[in-house]
Image: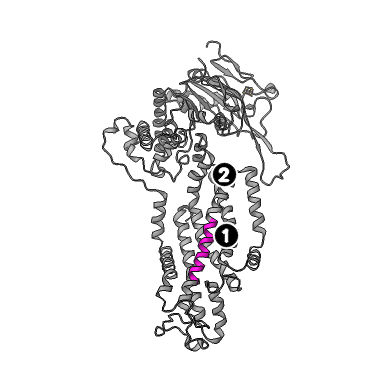
Amino acid sequence: MVSASLRGRGLESLPLDEVKGRSLWADARRRFLRNKAAVAGLVLLVLIAVFSFTGEWIAAWSNEEIDFNVIGSAATMGMPSFENGHYFGTDDLGRDQFARTAQGTRVSLMVGLVGTFIAVVVGTIYGAVAGYVGGRTDQIMMRIVDILFAIPFMFVLILLLVMFGRSMVMIFIGIGLLSWLGMARIVRGQTISLKHKEYIEAARASGVPGWKIIFRHIVPNLLGIVAVYATLLVPDMIMTESFISFLGLGVQEPLTSLGALISEGSKAITQGAMWQLWFPFGFFVVTLYAFYFVGDGLRDALDPKDR
Amino acid sequence: MTPLLDVRDLSVTFAIRGEGDMPWTEPRQLRAVNGVSFTLNPGETLGIVGESGCGKSTLARALIRMVPAEGRVLWQGKTDLLSLAPRAMLPYRREIQMVFQDPLASLNPRMTVGQIIAEPLRTHHPDLSRAEVKARVQGMMERVGLLPNQINRYPHEFSGGQCQRIGIARALIVEPKLLICDEPVSALDVSIQAQVINLLAELQRELGLAMVFIAHDLSVVRHISDRVMVLYLGRVMEEASSTELFSHAAHPYTKALLSAVPIPDPKAERAKRVIPLDGDLPSPFRPPSGCVFRTRCGLADADCADQVPLLQGNSKHGLACHKAWVADSV
Ligand code: SF4
C-alpha cells in the first residue's frame, strides 16, 4: 500500500483530502436496510406510532364522547361504518373504537418504551460498572439483582397497583423497577468479556480513568447488544402491561390500553360485536411482530459473525 | 549514569481460583515471574525472549503495575513504581508506554484512528486545543508512515501492519522515555515484521527511547536489542549483551533456542545441529524442583534437581546453570 512503501517522510507534499471512515455503525445500517422483513417491521412501527398520536384528530368522535344513537344496541348499530364516523365501530357504551384504539395503542407503546428506556439506562450502567470493577463490588451488585429476580414480579406489581391505586405512574414505576434486571445481567457478561480486550488494557496502561474507560470504550461496544435486547424488551413490556390490564388492574378509565380494550372486546364476543376485539387485537399483534422483526434485523446487522 | 529502570527481584504471583471452587478453598498460587532483576539505561533496548507462558508478558505488565507485583522497580534511580499510590502512578504512565501484540485487538473498533492516537494526549494534556491535538496526531501519523488524511478512518479499514503503526503512534504521541513492546510483530506477516522492526529502531534512534522488546523468537530481537534476557518459567536463564549471547551462548536452553534460528548461509545451515527441545513446558503450578529447565535439559543430573542455580557471571554475561560457565575469553 502507499503508506507502507512510502514510509512517511515527504508525504506532506501530497495534497490529499481527509478520507471519511466507514464506521461499524454505518456497516450495520447498510446490512439492516438490506433486510426486508426488518425494514417492513420498522415501517409498520412508524405507521402505528403515527396512527397512535394522530388517530384522535382524524377520528370523527373523541374517545370520551358517547354516541347516544348507538348506546344500548352496540351489537346491532355500532358496527364499523363510514356513515356515522365510527370507522372501527363503537363499544357497548357507544364510544368510538377508532379513537379508543389510537389512545390504547399510544398508552401501550408508552409503557413499552418508558420501561425499556429505564432498562437501557439503569441496566447498562449498572451492568457495565459491576462487570468492569469486578471482585467484591461485582459480587454484591449481582447478588442484589439475583434477589430482585427471585421476587415474583407480577405479584409485586399487582400489589403495588392495589395498594397505591391504579395509575400510569404506578405502572411505569413497577415495570421500571424490574425491567432492568435482565439487561444488567447481559451487559455485565458482555463487559467482562470486553474487559480483557487489549484496547481496554491499552487505555488502562496509559492512565485513562476507569469511568472514562467505561463510557468511551466499553459502553459503545455494548450498544449493539443493548439495542437488540431493548427492541425485544419493548414487546415484553407491552405484554406485561396488557396482561395486567386484562386482569382489570391496568390504567384507569378514561385512559385505556390495548390490553384493556382486548379485555372489553373479549366480553363482547358473545353479543356478536367482533370488531370490539379484532381491532385492538390486530394492533397488538402487528405491533409485537413488528418489534420482533426489527429486533431480529438488528441482531443480524450488528453481529454479522453470527450468521 | 543512573539507569532509567532498575528492577530488583521482581516477582508476580497470581492466586488462581478454579471453576466451582468454594469461597473458602485456598486459591492455587501461580508464580508467573520469579525474582527477575535487570537494569535498563536511557536509549538502550532490552530484548526478553522465551516460549509463550514463560512470564515475559506478565513481567512487562508488572513494570507498569497492570498486575500486582513484589520487588522493586526504580525509575531513574529515585521512584519505586511499585510503592506508588495508583494516582501517583499517573505521570509515569505517560513516560512508559506500551505497544501490544495483536494490532487490531489493541484498537477500539468504534473509534477513529485520530481518536485512538489522541487518547493518551487528551489524558495527559487535557489543556491542549482541538486543533493542536489534531496537528500533533497528524504529525505522528506521518512519522510512523501513515497517511495523515486517513485520520477519520476506523481500525478495520487498515491492514495488520498499519494497525501496528497506529498502536506505535498512540504510544509515542506523549513522548515517553520507555517503550514496552509486547511481541509487537508476532501477529504480523514475516515481510511486514521487518518493516515494523525497522520503524521501531528508527524511531528509537531519533527519539532516544529506551525499549523493552519482548519476543518468543531470538531472531526477532537480535538486531534491535543491546542486551537480551532469556526467560523460562518465570526465571532468568541467561542474560548478556546481544553480540555476546549470539556468539557465546552458554545455557543449554539458550543454545536450544538458538539452534532453531535459521542461518542465512545454506552451508552453515546444513552443518548446524538442531538441539531438540523435548516435551512440553511443565505446568507453572508445579514447577520442577531445583533448576526449572531440568525436565527438558540434556545435561541435567541429580544436582540440578536439588539446587536452584543462581544467576552468576559478570555484568556482561549472566547465567543460571550448574553445568555451564561463562567463557573466560570475554
Ligand atoms: S542447571 Fe542442570 S538442568 Fe538446569 S540448565 Fe543447567 S544443566 Fe540443565
Q: Position of residue A3 (x, y in %)?
A: 33, 36
Q: Which residues are magenta?
A: A104-119
Q: Position of residue A130 (x, y in %)?
A: 59, 47
Query: At x 49% / y 57%, what residue is drawn?
Result: A228
- Ligand 1's quadrant is top right
Query: For mark 1, what is the residue?
Result: A176
Q: How many neighbours does mark 2 have within 10 angstroms: few (below 14), some (14-19), or many (20 or more)?
A: many
The answer to whether residue A189 of the structure is visible from this angle is no
Give amino acid for label 2: Tyr
- For residue B32, above or below residue A296: above
The residue closer to the viewer here, A64 or A180, is A64
- Residue A144 x %, y %: 65, 52
Q: How many marks?
A: 2
Mark pair 1, 2: CA separation = 24 Å
Q: Main secondary structure of the magenta part?
A: helix
Q: Chain of mark 1?
A: A
* Residue matched to label 2: A132
